[in-house]
Image (tube, coloured by chain):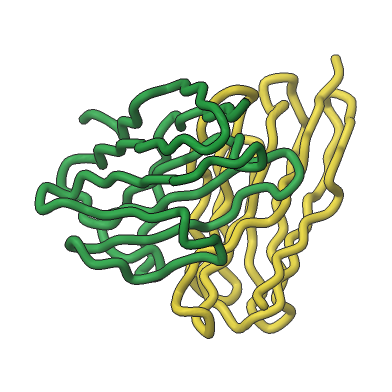
Chain colours: A green, B yellow
């Protein structure tokens, strides 16, 4: 069974640009969550989607947005990139809601570097 | 705000020794997860603890949950080098829209 697939693996962007990251969940998983991981802040929750609906959102500015498609694939977008957005962005999928006893299965992440 | 605190944040231990990583959290929750992350890799699910008193064991790792004390422990028995990694606990905040909040992680280095 294929795991969670994130593309691209690496991205280098300049300040002010925008970026779109993609995540394909494990087949049959309907919940997708996004996390930002940095050495200073650790793992911070961005959003959670279930059946194309955003169920939860973390404390990030409006420049961070996301969506989920009918096939459960998800994308997140960051506009007007800032240096501080450099991070590893992790996508995770689960069978049900994370709060419903379903562990998250993480992808390998997208390493974003903003210069 | 839901806070999840792990300690220690860094642990260097000799092979063959035992040690415990602690995870304290600030909210009512009966769902706690432990993950492992190797350098440059993603997070791997280790344990899912779903009730007070839950205990799970896998190899040299054993995790437990005390919901009344809001505490989970990850016990390492007779450590081996292959256990070197960063370990995260994560708590579902029922009062926070069922968000999953991670601790800062414990970097474990097992020296031979």
Residue A113 horizontal side relative to residue B15, left or right = left
Callout count = 0
Relative height, residue A11 to residue A17 (above, below)? above
Q: Quadrant of the C terminus of chain B?
A: top right
Q: Nearer the viewer, residue A23 or B50?
A: A23
Determine the residue located farthest toward the top in the rendered image.
B112
Snapshot quadrant of residue A73: top left
Image location (x, y in percent) of residue B86: 69, 36
Is any atom of residue B43 visible in this view? no
Relative height, residue B57 to residue B33 (above, below)? above
Image location (x, y in percent) of residue A68: 22, 53
Determine the residue located farthest toward the front in the rendered image.
A16
Residue drawn at 71 percent across, 70 percent down: B3
Q: Nearer the viewer, residue A77 or A33?
A: A77
Residue drawn at 65 percent across, 37 percent down: A83
Q: Nearer the viewer, residue B13 or A8?
A: A8
Image location (x, y in percent) of residue A28: 15, 48
Residue drawn at 33 percent across, 54 percent down: A66
Q: Quadrant of the N terminus of chain B?
A: bottom right
Is any atom of residue A69 visible in this view? yes
Determine the residue located farthest toward the left in the rendered image.
A70
Residue drawn at 69 percent across, 64 percent down: B72
């Amino acid at each position: 069974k294929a795991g969670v697939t994130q593309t691209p693996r690496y991205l280098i962007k300049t300040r002010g640009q925008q970026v779109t990251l993609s995540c394909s969940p494990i087949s049959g998983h309907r919940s997708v969550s996004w996390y930002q991981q940095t050495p200073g802040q650790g793992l911070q929750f961005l959003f959670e989607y279930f059946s194309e609906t955003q169920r939860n959102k973390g404390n990030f500015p409006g420049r961070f947005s996301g969506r989920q498609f009918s096939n459960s694939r998800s994308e997140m977008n960051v506009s007007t990139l800032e240096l501080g957005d450099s991070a590893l962005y992790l996508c995770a999928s689960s069978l049900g809601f994370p709060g419903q006893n379903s562990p998250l299965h993480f992808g390998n992440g997208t390493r974003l570097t903003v210069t | 705000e839901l806070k999840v605190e792990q300690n220690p944040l860094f642990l260097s231990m000799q092979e063959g020794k035992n040690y415990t990583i602690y995870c304290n959290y600030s909210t009512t929750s009966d769902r706690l997860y432990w993950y492992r992350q190797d350098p440059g890799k993603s997070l791997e699910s280790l344990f899912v603890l779903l009730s007070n008193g839950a205990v799970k064991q896998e190899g040299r790792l054993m995790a437990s949950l005390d919901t009344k004390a809001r505490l989970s422990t990850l016990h390492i028995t007779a450590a081996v080098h292959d256990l070197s990694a960063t370990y995260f606990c994560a708590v579902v905040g029922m009062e926070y829209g069922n968000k999953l909040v991670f601790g800062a992680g414990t970097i474990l280095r097992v020296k031979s």
